[in-house]
Image (tube, grey):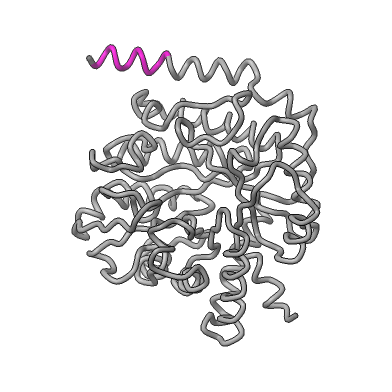
């Protein structure tokens, strides 16, 4: 196995079934050497179980700590058990009009995640809820204006990353103006470049300027940017717009490549290769291990044949390495005693009550 082949697994973030690290899963992680894993509700039962799970996962990757990620946006996109402090959806924070509360909510979430060994949150949603017919964003967005989304998005990035949890701005270059759900089909946005510049791009520009560590792409086709490919697979959108025009050199993840917006049109191997060629660093595959294997094999073949150039591979590996150096090192296992002190503690519950009370006051005042 060449050095390049040995490192290809670092490009992938993968999901798995179960609440423990079975011998089979441990063997797979040691062989594949993924750069990270993503956890869902199916993996999470209790504080104690999550501590054991994340410590066990890290023991499978002694040479490079795993990014252990989660979608913990609040509201309907929450994966943690009820004993954790579960904040309301982003639009409630938007109705509070308070960057201080948004920062505090993100910081609290980060403290509880870090206490159980989760070092990355797929948040904030930087999409502007600009289309009332959007079936997938809605209350996941902070609001319907780019200024509000930018302000609270930046506060969320700060709250997470100030507490050593990697933030991930999503879904670049904006999923707010779609009328279909990319989990089910490929949305097509016909908005002009000018409208995208005014409405969709500003929160991402601001997040980039503030140092957001990672970005997630949208499985959406933007006619004004690239009429042939969805953003995830588009060199025009990832390499040209995000990298060259917006000067972003952080880690770029794809949204889940198993979503129908991608998998109905591309094989999983082709999708992973095209994403990396486009400028993405980490293809995300959330469930099917066979698809992970297929994608890793396809990328390995593309690297061997130079369809993915050595330079392109080196860029992604360097970005992932920098991210881990900054947020994951030095690695220390988490303890159940520390986790119990943090998860759902009195001050965190008080903040949750304060957010609900603030929202009620603001809504009444504006009525």
Q: Position of residue 333 (x, y in %)?
A: 79, 42
Nearer to the camera, 83 or 225: 83
Tell me if I can see residue 156 in this picture: yes
Q: Is residue 33 above or below residue 181?
A: below
Residue 364 sits inside the magenta stretch: yes
Q: Residue at x 60, y 57 (%)?
A: 13
Q: Residue at x 57, y 64 (%)?
A: 291
* Rendered view: 113 above or below 265: above
Q: Quarter-wise, where is residue 197 in the image?
A: bottom left
Residue 185 place in picture, x, y as percent: 34, 56
Q: Position of residue 285 (x, y in %)?
A: 55, 58
Magenta stretch: includes residue 58: no
Question: Which quadrant would the N terminus be assigned to in this image?
Answer: bottom right
Which stretch appears magenta? 357-366
Report the quarter where the C terminus lies.
top left
Horizontal side of 344 relative to 57 (left or right) equals left
Q: Is residue 126 left or right of residue 123?
A: left
Question: Which quadrant would residue 14 be assigned to in this image?
Answer: bottom right
Q: Is residue 59 left or right of residue 179?
A: right
For the residue pair 158 and 16, the one nearer the viewer reads as 16
Instruction: Provide the major secondary structure of the magenta segment.
Output: helix
**Picture coordinates of residue 347, whole percent (x, y):** 61, 17
Q: Residue at x 61, y 45 (%)?
A: 39
**Which residue is situated farthest in the bottom direction here?**
305
């Amino acid at each position: 196995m060449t050095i390049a082949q040995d490192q290809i697994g670092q490009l992938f973030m993968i999901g798995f079934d179960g609440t423990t690290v079975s011998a089979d899963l441990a063997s797979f992680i040691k062989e594949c050497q993924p750069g990270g894993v993503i956890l869902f509700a199916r993996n999470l039962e209790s504080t104690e179980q999550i501590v054991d799970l994340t410590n066990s996962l890290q023991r499978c990757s002694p040479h490079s700590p795993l990014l252990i990620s989660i979608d913990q946006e609040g509201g309907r996109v929450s994966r943690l058990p009820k004993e954790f402090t579960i904040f309301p959806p982003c639009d409630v924070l938007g109705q509070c009009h308070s960057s201080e509360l948004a920062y505090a909510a993100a910081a609290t979430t980060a403290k509880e995640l870090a206490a159980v060994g989760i070092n990355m949150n797929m948040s904030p949603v930087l999409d502007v809820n600009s289309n009332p017919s959007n079936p997938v964003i809605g209350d996941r967005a902070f609001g319907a204006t780019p200024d509000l989304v930018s302000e609270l998005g930046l506060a969320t990035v700060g709250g997470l990353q100030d507490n050593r949890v990697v933030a991930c701005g999503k879904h670049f270059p904006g999923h707010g103006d779609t009328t279909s759900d990319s989990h089910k089909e490929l949305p097509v946005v016909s908005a002009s470049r000018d409208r995208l510049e005014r409405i969709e791009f500003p929160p991402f520009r601001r997040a980039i300027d503030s140092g957001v560590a990672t970005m997630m792409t949208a499985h959406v086709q933007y006619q004004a940017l690239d009429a042939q490919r969805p953003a995830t697979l588009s060199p025009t959108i990832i390499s040209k717009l995000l990298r060259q025009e917006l000067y972003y050199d952080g880690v770029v993840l794809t949204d889940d490549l198993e979503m129908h917006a991608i998998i109905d049109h591309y094989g999983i191997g082709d999708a992973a290769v095209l994403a990396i060629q486009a400028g993405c660093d980490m293809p995300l595959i959330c469930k099917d291990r066979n698809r992970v294997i297929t994608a890793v094999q396809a990328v390995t073949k593309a690297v061997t044949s130079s369809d993915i150039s050595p330079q392109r591979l080196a860029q992604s590996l360097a970005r992932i390495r920098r991210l881990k150096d900054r947020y994951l090192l030095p690695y220390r296992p988490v303890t159940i005693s520390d986790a119990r002190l943090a998860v759902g503690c009195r001050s965190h519950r008080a903040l949750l009550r304060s957010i609900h009370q603030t929202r009620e006051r603001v809504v009444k005042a504006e009525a």
